[in-house]
Image (spheres, rainbow, N blue to C red):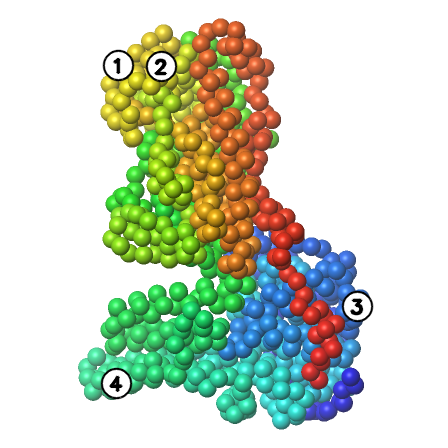
């Protein structure tokens, strides 16, 4: 369709109006007539240091590479001649990214289609600018902050400048400039970066362009222009709120525009939304007013009365009651109403003291938030309940909270305690700690062994090179040993950072898999989108899932542990070498094995795993034991071990090792519940993989849930999780049993063959298979592969050509 060129302002006026948009990025130094080059954002170390850690890491992520740079692209574009990458990003914008465009009471996906149609009007620099802004926003949304998104943004700014000097610049160009400016504003708001603070400059530039135009002329082309003006009006009020409330030094004042008065007359907003925006403005004015002196009692009384009236007016907004079938617009209005009430209460500094009602408003808001379609598309805040607050529950909670989900952990005990003392964490475990941002905290308490040594029970060295420090296997992700209590402490620090709710003293009695929901012993009911059973080898959740009690069983193995203060190991002591060199040491003999390593930098952890058979008392946790009982199990073993027993201050405890019957299934058929960790696959401590497999569960879950775009995908997500984890966990479990049997060989031909193999060197293939595994990446790849063959992923609605056919101009 041929669009008439309508002059809406003089060239000089338009050029002046565009200055705020041109200069907003702080990157482009001169116009007109030339495409800018990339400077600063990616190459300047000072700018890069200002980026948040998450954004900085994403800049180095894996992003598809385009064939040609957008900076050298033509100022016009043809949708049939796009690179595959750009075509995919446009489809992604229409179907997914557009849902995150911030507006109020509008169909954001429809807004995305409008923007794409506007970009298809004319082969001009202004149209190209809008196209490049679409690409920039889609790339940012899909891949995070990286060079591709920044390049497209800079290209858009360059074409904006070029378009303002085109002779045919008219109403269509103005509409395209307005659309581009708002998209670039959304770009900066969407993710923190070194230029995020300039979103108000884009907004001010858009308003200046409108001031240089004729709104009536713009409106005559299409009613869709009203949608753009509503989008601007919402951002305008939000900007006033931000600038007035925070009073940021040097913050620009937004120019007045006719839209401030015209929007109520021409807006598509429902009346309650316009009322909300007006009330939000009044809240801004109230909160930003000068503080009232306590001595001025009359003024305080008047101010309190005004705040109470404002509170009443917000509560009296004619918003439909939220029900199970409420549409998105109703949910958004209710959410804004609750947010304004909460903010007015908090910002009025106690004038309205209603803590119970405020908490109810917060709870209502969190219940509404996950039901929004935009949350399903971009911000999948799934409410996830964990039963159990051990290593499995905390690790999985961290993995899922890190991807934006709301997580609550229920623990029966009134205080957190970890059974045992030392624990070995191989690289497949520490790699996950690194993913979750807690490895640095863990390393404060951990020791890193320099080597490992396998010995016969007599003390003969069989191998001195287990790969605990082999750079080929522990590259970037270290092998560490740590006290369980210290590991738990580090994980808990992560839960506070991610605002994970941990509810101690919460005894789960029933699970309703269909809702799903938990019923506590107090008869409280907690509903969630998905529930995960992480309550260990003695799992009550496993019994509820299977429909019958499924207690763990004892194969007859008992663990003895002595903690030896290294300060009491003197130079003339037989164990001096164990103190001098940080290493993991193994002794193997008939019926069991001993392992020792340093924990908490000052304690030698010595553990004997011994097969006592079916006799003896079953012990569900560490109990005090006699040192002589320990000694009797290893009477003819290495004298070094007996010396350790004799060290003053050594303390001995013991407990029973348990195994579980491998469940036939981990998840409920409803697709809303799954077992994880020891509740699904308890593993004996003979391959140092118990905690590692727990962390792998968490990593795979986090990887999968980071890619979900709707609650309807949760059942398939749990299915993929089980398909990924069950075979590997089972394989590790059986390899652990083989290792246990190998460690406990009595003297004879089999023992001699084992010793020959050990003298030949460590089994690098086994350790490579175990330690190089990246659970988070495995989860992501599994979900991507699943969605390729199922009805998930980004799909076009009508296609770009279909959108073009319904051109608005």
Under circle 4, the secondary element is helix
Measured as percent of width and height from the top left, residue 462 is found at 51, 13
State whether residue 15 appears in this view: no
- Disc number placed over residue 80 in the picture, else none: 3
> Mark 1 and mark 2: span between their CA atoms?
12 Å
> Mark 4 and mark 1: span between their CA atoms?
78 Å
Measured as percent of width and height from the top left, residue 557 is found at 36, 21
Please identify the quarter of the rendering in which residue 553 is found: top left
Q: Is residue 535 left or right of residue 627?
A: right
Q: Is residue 773 positioned above or below 583 on the image? A: below
- Work out whether mark 1 precedes mark 3 in sequence or the reverse, and give the earlier one: 3
Q: Which residue is mark 1?
A: 628
> Mark 2 and mark 3: span between their CA atoms?
77 Å
Residue at 55% across / 42% down in the picture?
723
> Mark 1 and mark 3: span between their CA atoms?
83 Å
Residue positioned most to the front: 547
Q: Which residue is mark 4?
A: 305
- Work out whether mark 4 precedes mark 2 in sequence or the reverse, and give the earlier one: 4
Disc 3: CA contacts within 10 A as few (<14), some (14-19) or many (>=20): few
Under circle 2, the secondary element is helix
State whether residue 373 appears in this view: yes
Q: Which residue is mark 2?
A: 641
């Amino acid at each position: 369709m041929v669009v008439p060129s309508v002059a809406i302002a003089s060239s000089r006026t338009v050029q002046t109006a565009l200055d705020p948009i041109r200069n907003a990025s702080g990157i482009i130094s001169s116009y007109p007539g030339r495409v800018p080059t990339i400077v600063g954002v990616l190459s300047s170390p000072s700018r890069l240091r200002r980026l948040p850690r998450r954004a900085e890491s994403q800049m180095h992520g894996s992003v598809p590479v385009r064939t040609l740079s957008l900076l050298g692209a033509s100022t016009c574009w043809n949708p049939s001649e796009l690179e595959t990458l750009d075509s995919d990003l446009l489809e992604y914008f229409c179907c997914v990214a557009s849902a995150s465009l911030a507006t109020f009471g509008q169909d954001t996906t429809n807004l995305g289609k409008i923007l794409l149609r506007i970009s298809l009007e004319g082969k001009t620099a202004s149209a190209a600018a809008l196209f490049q802004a679409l690409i920039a926003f889609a790339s940012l949304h899909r891949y995070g902050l990286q060079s591709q998104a920044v390049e497209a943004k800079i290209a858009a700014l360059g074409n904006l400048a070029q378009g303002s000097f085109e002779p045919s610049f008219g109403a269509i160009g103005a509409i395209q400039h307005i659309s581009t400016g708002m998209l670039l504003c959304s770009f900066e708001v969407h993710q923190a970066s070194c230029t995020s603070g300039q979103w108000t400059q884009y907004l001010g530039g858009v308003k200046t362009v409108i001031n240089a135009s004729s709104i009536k002329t713009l409106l005559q082309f299409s009613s869709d222009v009203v949608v753009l003006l509503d989008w601007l009006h919402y951002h305008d009020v939000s900007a006033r709120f931000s600038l007035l409330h925070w009073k940021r030094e040097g913050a620009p004042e937004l120019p007045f525009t006719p839209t401030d008065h015209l929007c109520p007359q021409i807006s598509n907003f429902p009346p309650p939304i316009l009322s909300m925006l007006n009330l939000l403005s009044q809240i801004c004015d109230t909160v930003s007013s000068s503080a009232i002196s306590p001595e001025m009692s009359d003024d305080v009384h008047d101010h309190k009365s005004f705040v109470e009236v404002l509170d009443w007016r917000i509560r009296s907004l004619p918003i439909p009651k939220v029900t199970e079938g409420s549409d998105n617009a109703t949910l958004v209005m209710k959410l804004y109403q609750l947010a304004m009430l909460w903010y007015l209460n908090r910002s009025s500094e106690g004038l309205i003291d209603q803590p119970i009602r405020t908490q109810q408003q917060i709870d209502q808001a969190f219940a509404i938030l996950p039901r929004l379609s935009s949350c399903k598309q971009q911000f999948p805040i799934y409410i996830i309940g964990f039963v159990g607050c051990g290593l499995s529950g905390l690790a999985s909670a961290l993995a899922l909270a890190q991807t934006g989900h709301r997580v609550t952990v229920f623990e029966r005990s009134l205080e957190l305690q970890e059974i045992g003392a030392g624990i070995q964490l191989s690289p497949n475990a520490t790699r996950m700690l690194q993913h979750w941002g807690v490895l640095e905290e863990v390393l404060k308490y951990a020791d890193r062994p320099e080597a490992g040594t396998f010995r016969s029970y007599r003390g003969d060295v069989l191998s001195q090179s287990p790969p605990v420090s082999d750079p080929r296997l522990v590259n970037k992700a270290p092998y560490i040993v740590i006290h369980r209590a210290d590991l738990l402490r580090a994980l808990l620090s992560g839960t506070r950072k991610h605002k994970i709710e941990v509810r101690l003293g919460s005894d789960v009695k029933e699970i309703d898999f269909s809702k799903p929901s938990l019923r506590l012993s107090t008869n409280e009911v907690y509903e969630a989108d998905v529930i995960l059973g992480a309550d260990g080898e003695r799992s009550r959740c496993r019994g509820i899932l299977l429909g019958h009690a499924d207690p763990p069983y004892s194969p007859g193995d008992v663990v003895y542990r002595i903690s030896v203060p290294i300060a009491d190991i003197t130079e003339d002591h037989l164990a001096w070498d164990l103190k001098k060199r940080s290493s993991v040491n193994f002794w193997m003999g008939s019926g069991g094995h001993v392992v020792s390593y340093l924990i908490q930098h000052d304690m030698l952890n010595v553990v004997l795993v011994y097969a006592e058979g079916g006799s003896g008392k079953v012990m569900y946790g560490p109990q005090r034991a006699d040192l002589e009982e320990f000694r009797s199990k290893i009477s003819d073993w290495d004298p070094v071990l007996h010396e350790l027993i004799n060290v003053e201050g050594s303390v001995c405890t013991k407990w029973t090792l348990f195994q579980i019957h491998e469940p036939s299934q981990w998840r409920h058929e409803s697709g809303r519940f799954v077992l994880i960790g020891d509740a699904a696959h308890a593993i004996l401590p003979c391959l140092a993989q118990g905690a590692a497999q727990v962390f792998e569960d968490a990593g795979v879950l986090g990887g999968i849930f980071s890619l979900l775009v709707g609650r309807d995908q949760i059942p398939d997500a749990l299915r993929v999780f089980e398909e990924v984890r069950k075979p590997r966990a089972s394989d590790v479990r059986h390899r652990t049993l083989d290792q246990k049997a190998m460690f406990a060989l009595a003297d004879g031909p089999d023992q001699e063959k084992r010793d020959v193999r050990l003298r030949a060197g460590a089994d690098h293939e086994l350790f490579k298979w175990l330690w190089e595994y990246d659970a988070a990446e495995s989860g992501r790849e599994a979900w991507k592969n699943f969605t390729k063959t199922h009805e998930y992923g980004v799909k076009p609605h009508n296609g770009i050509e279909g959108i073009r056919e319904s051109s608005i101009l």
